[in-house]
């Protein structure tokens, strides 16, 4: 059964084009269109409804230890009131089952934020062997999450809540809006500054309306995808997923080898010792023709890689892609992408493709 956001009525009232995504009906774009929404995020401020992302509330004595054993990163490097990006691995082959942001709310409470369709899988993995003092429950339906992103995001959000606008990057804090207890984190998925606000579902529409009234532009999944691609950020099911490890995706920095055992460590250590057989790289193509996922990458004229995500970059005004290629392919190398039988030249470049001003 398809799920709807607490903001579903607001999106429809704004004329959003709704599409299924990860089991949810979510806005792809609003009448201004994806390109306008993308540029608004790069130059001003936009609001995304990201309520389709899960929230698994882990709480109770022993929660930290349980998460340390389940996830790759080391939460002790941050602390309460902070957020951390991390991975949940398959114990057999170290594939990334999900990439996750953990909001460490207080000493014994963590809000674990999985991708849309992975929430049940994450709950199952986290509760395997969990002590009786720890609970892990899906509270996704209880709140909406609104991401306010862009170089003017904090300025405009401050008209709604000074507290929410003031949260530091990768910090987490409670805030009160019109007497309502909410939560904010200095996180996002666009490459721009911004925050994500978790608001009780029954008050989410009023909060969303207040954010838009402050001059923030509504934006949909279309712009969110082109923004994250320009920022070189992975999308589960494309750059991460079955058969793809943290090391292959160039995300070894989310693995803390010195914290002790964690789920999938043995398989990942074996790959580290042997060396990865492929590596995720950024590609820029000549011209405006956008590469697409699953197109073949030609190295020295031979098929030897695959595009995981590709699109037209509104800021660079050319096609860009993320692709798995042999580890011997270096930044600056010339390759090609097979676009419906035509070898389109591409250069291997450093990501992110676009950096904030």
Image (cartoon, helix red, strand yellow):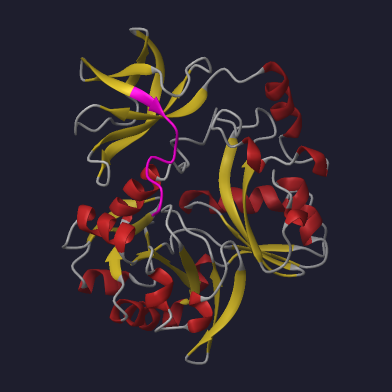
* x, y percent for residue 308: 40, 31
The question of residue 356 being in magenta is answered with yes
Q: Does residue 89 appear in this view? A: no
Q: Is residue 232 visible?
A: yes
Residue at x 69% of width, y 43% of height:
72
Where residue 337 sits in the image (x, y, percent)?
A: 30, 20
- Give the magenta-colored segment's residue range: 347-357
Q: Residue 185, percent across and down? A: 55, 67
Q: Which residue ends up furthest to the left in the rendered image?
A: 31
Using the rendered view, name the quadrant where residue 55 is placed: bottom right
Q: Nearer the viewer, residue 216 or 350?
A: 350
Quarter of the figure with the C terminus:
bottom left
Relative side of 32 to 209, left or right: left
Comparing 28 with 312, the one in front is 312
Secondary structure mainly formed by the magenta segment: loop
For the point 32% across and 47% down, which residue is it? 226
Q: Nearer the viewer, residue 1 or 181?
A: 181
**Quarter the N terminus occupies:** bottom left
As drawn, is 39 to the left or to the right of 141?
left
Q: Nearer the viewer, residue 247 or 93?
A: 247
* Total numbered labels: 0
Q: Residue at x 31, y 23 (%)?
A: 346
Whether 328 is drawn above or below 149: the answer is: above
What residue is at 81 percent from the left and 40 percent from the top? 258
């Amino acid at each position: 059964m398809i799920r709807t956001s607490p903001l579903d009525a607001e999106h429809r009232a704004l004329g959003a084009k709704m599409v299924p995504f990860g089991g949810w009906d979510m806005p792809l774009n609003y009448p201004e269109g994806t390109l306008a929404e993308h540029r608004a995020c790069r130059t001003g401020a936009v609001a995304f409804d990201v309520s389709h992302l899960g929230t698994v509330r882990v709480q109770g004595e022993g929660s930290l230890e349980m998460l340390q054993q389940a996830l790759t990163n080391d939460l002790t490097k941050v602390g309460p009131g902070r957020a951390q990006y991390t991975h949940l691995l398959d114990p057999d082959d170290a594939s990334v089952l999900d990439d996750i942001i953990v909001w460490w709310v207080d000493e014994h409470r963590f809000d674990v934020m999985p991708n849309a369709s992975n929430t049940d899988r994450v709950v199952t993995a986290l509760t395997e062997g969990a002590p009786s003092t720890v609970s892990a429950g899906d509270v996704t339906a209880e709140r909406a999450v609104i991401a306010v992103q862009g170089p003017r995001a904090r300025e405009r959000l401050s008209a709604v809540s000074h507290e929410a606008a003031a949260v530091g990057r990768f910090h987490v804090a409670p805030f009160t809006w019109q007497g309502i207890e909410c939560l904010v984190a200095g996180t996002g998925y666009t490459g721009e500054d911004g925050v994500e606000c978790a608001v009780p579902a029954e008050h989410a529409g009023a909060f969303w309306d207040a954010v838009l009234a402050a001059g923030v532009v509504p934006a949909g999944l279309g712009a969110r995808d082109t923004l994250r691609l320009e920022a070189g950020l992975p999308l589960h099911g494309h750059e991460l997923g079955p058969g793809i490890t943290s090391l292959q995706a160039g995300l070894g920095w989310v693995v803390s080898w010195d914290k002790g055992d964690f789920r999938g460590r043995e398989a990942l250590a074996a790959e580290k010792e042997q060396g990865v057989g492929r590596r995720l790289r950024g590609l820029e193509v000549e011209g405006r023709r956008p590469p697409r996922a699953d197109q073949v990458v030609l190295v020295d004229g031979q098929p030897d890689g695959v595009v995981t995500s590709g699109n037209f970059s509104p800021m660079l005004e050319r096609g860009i892609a993320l692709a798995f290629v042999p580890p011997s392919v270096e930044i600056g190398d010339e390759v090609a992408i097979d676009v419906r039988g035509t070898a389109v030249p591409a250069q291997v470049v450093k990501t992110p493709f676009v950096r904030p001003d």
